[in-house]
Amino acid sequence: MGLVWPLLEQYRVDIAFTGHIHTYVRTRPIRFTPRADAVAALDPVTRQGELKGALAWDRRFNGRDRTRARGVIHIVTGAGGAPLHLKGKAALFTLKPYVARTDLEQNSFSLLEINGRKLIFRQITAQGEELDRFILTK
């Protein structure tokens, strides 16, 4: 993900969705600047290795009255129906200051409504309850 991050920022991507891990996690808007020496140290063929750099997150964005994000919001939305991978392991994310919301205990799905320059994101449980909600304005 590290080498992709500058591209996400360069092209002003607002949200990056991933799945695979069966859970729900949303970060605050994040900016990441990899160190040049760390990029140069990656394996030249596979581009794998540890990528160090500066991580910053937008503490002002709250998705209610502050809806313009400075950075990319990363959402893991893989809690749709398979057994949950991280059930009972909430401590993995609760100590991370850049994590805005998690739910590792129940199945859910993501719903996006887009109207012009405004996006409303909702994470909904299998029972129809809203787990998470934010507004993003471009």
Image (cartoon, rainbow, N blue to C red):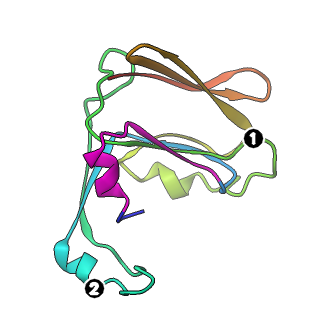
**Could you say where residue 24 lies in the image, as x and y percent from the top left?**
61, 43
User: Which residue shows up at 32% across the image and 14% down it?
Assistant: 65
Disc 1: CA contacts within 10 A as few (<14), some (14-19) or many (>=20): some
Disc 1 versus disc 2: distance between alpha carbons? 38 Å
The answer to whether residue 68 is left or right of residue 23 is left
* Amino acid carrying mark 1 in the image: Gly
Q: Is residue 110 left or right of residue 37?
A: right
Question: Percent x, y for residue 97?
Answer: 35, 48
Question: Dots 1 and 2: beta carbons under 8 Å?
Answer: no
Q: Residue at x 33, y 83 (%)?
A: 42
- What kind of element bears circle 2? loop
- Amino acid type of the residue that numbered disc 2 sits on in the rendered structure: Ala
Residue 90, position as x, y percentages in the image? 59, 51
Is residue 57 shown in magenta?
Answer: no
Please tell me whether residue 76 is drawn above or below residue 1 in the rendered image: above
Q: Position of residue 81 (x, y in %)?
A: 81, 43
Res. 41 mark:
2
Q: Is residue 14 found inside the magenta-colored segment of the image?
A: yes
- Residue stretch in magenta: 4-19
In-image side of 8 versus 82 (left or right): left
Q: Which mark, residue 80? A: 1
Disc 2 packing (10 Å; few <14; some 14–19; many ≥20): few
Label 1 residue SS: loop
